[in-house]
Structure formats: structure tokens, C-alpha cells
Amino acid sequence: MISCDKCSGRAVIFQKYSGKHLCAQHFEEDVHRKVKEVLRAYRIFGKPCRIAVAVSGGKDSSSLLMILHNLFSYRDDVELLAISIDEGIEGYRTKTIQAAEAVAKQLGIEHVVEKLEDNFGVTTDLMASQGHAQGPCSFCGVLRKGLLNKTARELSADAVATGHNLDDEAQTVMLNYLKGDVDRLYRLRPKRALAGMVPRIKPLRRVPEKEMGIYAITHNIPIDTSACPYISRAMRQEVKDLLNEIEAKHPGTKYSIMKGFDKILAREPPGSYEVIPCNRCGEPSSDGICASCRLLDRVRAEQSL
């Protein structure tokens, strides 16, 4: 048996980047420490707030819901609610939403489910069947984010917490580097409240994906481990595989990517991002037509052929 470096307990993880073996208790403390450090930067929890947690039913978002519940359940001025978006992926999303319902029920947290089909008249399966060059993930992501923001706003949430972990964030940074999209890189920084847009927070951005899996296992969190059937068609999967290979050879690489990214954000040139209502649906946009409406135009044009 390998012992924890901080006590005599049985180690449940070896962190290559830190060189530490940790037992279940000290591993939990390490995860919670990282989450608290991120949350302090957002400066939201120092006052009464209502936080909507985007829960898909996977290990990251379900663990996030439990972590926030454990950290703030003693406070009467912090309220949590869970939101799940059903994109309409047959044989996949139904199971993951059941898992999300299970963890929300276990914690006694309100759970709201919204469907793309009910709100936009389309599903991810439909968009995938049309064979767009961008792939279904691009379409799905735009509509999912828009509906999540709309739902959180209508539920009077002060912020939306998403389960993006260190791996997710490093992949996003690298994707934008590879695409040369500097403007989008700057848009990844935490934003002040803008008209119609609920601020987003990412409490897990310093916690590796592997550790979120171990957290879910050690806390017996009900999760669904199936993968979206369309993920293999996304460039993100290629970047994920590449970063995992580099991380295995050079532990700490993902943390280094994020440290470098944070330094870039600190040097962001002054400027403003104006948000105006979409002249079709009223949701936030930069030029009068939101990303969701532009996307739906393409989908419906394809349907009419």
C-alpha cells in the first residue's frame, strides 16, 4: 500500500505535477483549495447570490455541484440551482440528464431541464444529419450556451457555474492559438455583467480532468460515463489527445499553458465589448443579430431544400 505524503492513510492518487501521493481526505482538501482560490478571484460569493450550475450528468459538472454544495451549504445567503440542457442526441442525453437529476435530488437542489427542440425547433441530431462543414459541435455549442444563459437569466441567477476543468481550458486556449483567433482568446477572460448576459464562472479551471474523475469516484457521485457520439468529429478531440501525450511526458504542461494564458490576459489592451439586443429574439448580440439566430438561419435553409 502506498501511503499519503501528509498522513499514514492509503493514497488514492499520485499527482505527477506535484510529486505528491494523497489520501482521499487530503485529495479532497487539495481540490477544494484550488476551487476556493478560483472563486475568490470572481468576487461573487462575498454577498448574497443565486448560482446556476450547468449540470450535464458527467463527472465534472456533477462533482462541481457537490463541491459548491459542500462549500456553501452552511450559508443561507448562497443558493444553488442546477440547469441541464437537452440538445436532442438520441441514446445519449436522456441517460446523462437522469444522472444529473440523481445528484441534484441527492443534494436537495432544484433541477431545471430545457430542450433545444422546445426553444428553437431543432435538435443536434438534426443539425448533424445536414452535413454542415463545421460539424455538429459548433452548432450545438452556440445554441446550448445561448439557452443556458437565457434560462439562468429567467431564473434570476447572479452567475452560471460551468464544469470546465483544467484540461478543457488548456484545450480551448490551444484551439484558439492554432486558429490564430486572438480576439476569442481575450473573450475567455472573466467578464463584468453585460446587458442580458449572466456572468460565467469556472470553479474547476485549476483542477485536472483526471482528478475530477477520482473525486466523483471517492464521493460516490452518480454520473454517466458515456461520451457524446459526435465528439470524434471535433478538432478539440485531436487537441485533447495531443495535450495528454505531452502532459504524460512533461507533467505540469497544462498548468503552464494556463499560466501563460493568464499573463496574456493581464496585458489585454483597453477596449469595450458592446452588447445590444438581437432584433429577432431579443437575446444579447454584438451587432443586432445573435449567433443563435444566424445559426438557425443556416439550419432552416437546409431544411427547406
Image: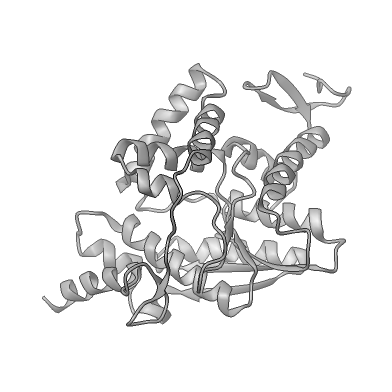
Q: Residue at x 34, y 55 (%)?
A: 137
| Quarter location, residue 111 | bottom right
* Residue 8: x %, y % from top left: 89, 22
Q: Quadrant of the C terminus?
A: bottom left
Q: Nearer the viewer, residue 171 or 228?
A: 171
**Above or below for 303 versus 267:** below
Q: Left or right of 301: which side holds 258?
A: right
Q: Percent from the top left, x then y, of residue 224? A: 56, 54
Total numbered labels: 0
Tell me which colouring the rendered structure shows. one colour
Q: Nearer the viewer, residue 108 or 162?
A: 162
Looking at the picture, does residue 48 appear above or below residue 154?
above
Residue 169: x and y in percent read 50, 42
Please name the residue shown 40% across and 32% down the image. Answer: 241
Q: Quadrant of the N terminus?
A: top right
Residue lying farthest to the front in this orientation: 270
Expressed as whole percent of the image width and height from the top left, the position of residue 187 reads 44, 52
Image quadrant assignment for residue 75: bottom right
Outermost residue to the left: 305
| Residue appearing at x 80%, y 38% in the figure | 29
